[in-house]
Image (cartoon, rainbow, N blue to C red):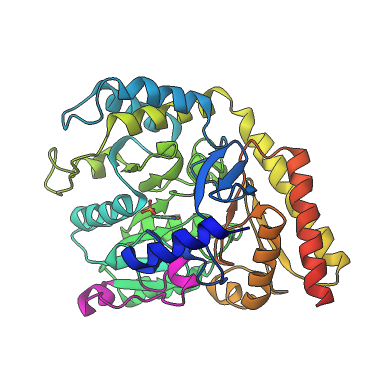
Amino acid sequence: MIKKSEKAFQEAVNYIPGGVNSPVRAFKSVGGTPRFIKRAKGAYLTDEDNTKYIDLIGSWGPMILGHAFEPVENAVRKAIKSSFSFGAPTVKEVEMAKLICDLVPSVEMVRMVNSGTEATMSAIRLARAYTGKNKIIKFEGCYHGHGDAFLISAGSGALSLGVPDSPGITPSTLGDTLTAPYNDLDAVKRLLETHKGEVAALIIEPVVGNMGCVLPKEGYLQGLRDLCTKEGVVFIFDEVMTGFRLALGGAQERFGITPDLTTMGKIIGGGMPVGAYGGKKEIMQMVAPSGPMYQAGTLSGNPIAMSAGMAMLKHLKKHPEIYAQLDETGAFIAEGLRKSVKELGLNYTVNQIGSMYSLFFTSEHVVDFKTAKTADIPAFSKYFHQMLNRGVYLAPSQFESLFLSTKIDKRIANKILRASHYSLTSLVEE
Ligand code: PMP
């Protein structure tokens, strides 16, 4: 039953563009009515019609420890007693900065912002200020928030809605963003040769979540690191999704790569609106007021958000075994899905690393934007609705990674696999 969601959506479209405050939530690429969620706990979401779903989005990443995680809830409860925002420094911000510098290998200094978008926009401005160059390189199908410079061959919602190049971006911005296929080192080499001395930064999702889950090939990230070092390009890891997820120190720890700057979000807010960018001291000291690169925020370092995020990060630091558990659950689900598609003769592709995974509706080996786009979207859409009807809430797009939380245990993982097998079976039988 989706009566209440339907009513809410009908009303929403009159007042909010497309009825939602972030495009992918609208179910546009899969069709149907988006579920309006009223609460969540642990591994489950509950919608306005009181239907319960196993949640494989986790608020698009932050809920690595499940919804309404008690230490985070308690930290927020305690913090709100002292008011919500001061617009003045707090010791919590210092504590948060120290914690991030301690946990993320390449980060020596960090600035808090309010979203992943702010983090990436600021990081490229900083790279331009630091190098005195204008151009940036991004990868086709990667998403770095909705900053103008990134809405070119963008992934995530832009890709799901078929508008990877948004109107409203000026020709000069377009001209300053160079794009290359993911996992193709030679393409980057060629770009750097053609635009020698012009490139300020190269920004990458070290593991892509925004064209579905796509992994870097062996040696690819190190190859990029070497090219950036050689050409004096600021190497930026966008760890908004991978940070504190693929390892406590993010993808950079997992792959042993040292970027110059890192952008973060999602988990560091524990579900509150937070982002951050940080990196080498020499570069970060360019940021105002210690340097001339201007960047500010009325609510940046907000005490409630800092309290939530800190409770989350401290828990992860205290329980590093969580990462082995997430890896195990991820591998278990990926194996189960592979077995299921093979049994049904479907030949679909499963990409997985730790707690990120995607079932791609294609037999291609998905390594980049081009191969991701070979997916059968109508088949995915049917599968999505089949899963929803069986109580499993997937991202409403083929071009999004799914996220596991520690609350998805073997029993729930088996439920997901069963729901998936039945859903795929009914597609085959259609
Ligand atoms: N970078 C990456 C890798 C992301 O996945 C996202 C959002 N999904 C962003 C940046 C933008 O973050 P936000 O939506 O918080 O602005």
Across and down, in percent, residue 49 comes to 57, 51
Is 176 situated above or below 318?
A: below
Horizontal placement of 363 versus 302: left or right? right
Q: Residue at x 30, y 37 (%)?
A: 110
Across and down, in percent, residue 419 comes to 77, 56
Q: Residue at x 16, y 32 (%)?
A: 87
Return the residue nearer the eye: 104 or 87: 87
Please state the quadrant of the image where ligand 1 appears: bottom left
Is 84 situated above or below 209?
A: above
Across and down, in percent, residue 355 comes to 62, 46
Whether residue 150 appears in this view of the structure is no
Is 358 situated above or below 42?
A: below
Horizontal placement of 95 versus 207: left or right? left
Task: Please state the extent of the stretch shown in magenta in the rendering.
Answer: 152-176
Whether residue 129 appears in this view of the structure is yes
Return the residue nearer the eye: 339 or 136: 339
Q: Residue at x 40, y 60 (%)?
A: 22
Q: Quadrant of residue 79?
A: top left
Q: Is residue 51 magenta?
A: no
Is 73 situated above or below 182?
A: above
Across and down, in percent, residue 106 comes to 40, 39
Q: Residue at x 69, y 52 (%)?
A: 391
